[in-house]
Image (cartoon, rainbow, N blue to C red):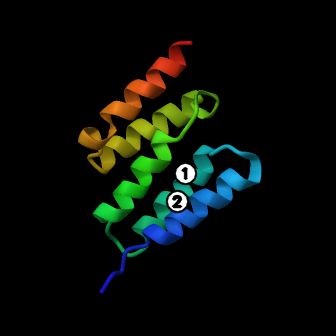
Amino acid sequence: MDNSDWKEMKQSAFEAFKNDGMMSVRELEKIVDIGLADGKFDNSEKEVLVNIISNLTGAEMTDAMWLKVDELIHKFDLHGDSEAFIEHLEDEHDL
């Protein structure tokens, strides 16, 4: 039985992007809360979170968003999954 909330997380991310084309820290926190609602954050939910973070643009990467992304990477041990997109975000941030 699949109790994962990854589909709801994905839908929430879609709605956030649909609203204004960007993801805010508050919207990202709401998506994480959806995944944590059942008390655990499974691999499917981690995959959705990695996908969301990897699609953030330089414009979305405010100081607050950098702090939140860093917190989430450490909280959910996304290091192995996140190296490529973190490098991508850092390259954009340097522009």
Above or below 68: residue 12: below
Specify the label residue 50 is tagged with. none
Which residue is pictured at 44% across the width and 26% down the height? 88
Residue identified by numbered label 1: 28
Residue identified by numbered label 2: 31
On screen, residue 41 versus residue 61, left or right, reads left
On screen, residue 24 versus residue 2, left or right, reads right
Above or below 19: residue 89: above
Q: Quadrant of the N terminus?
A: bottom left
In percent of width and height, residue 31 lies at 52, 59
On screen, residue 74 versus residue 61, left or right, reads left
On screen, residue 68 versus residue 39, left or right, reads right
Residue contact between numbered discs 1 and 2, judged by CB atoms under 8 Å: yes
In percent of width and height, residue 74 lies at 30, 42
Q: Type of residue at label 2?
A: Ile
Above or below 71: residue 14: below
In percent of width and height, residue 32 lies at 47, 58
Q: Type of residue at label 1?
A: Leu
Which residue is pictured at 38% across the width and 25% down the height? 87
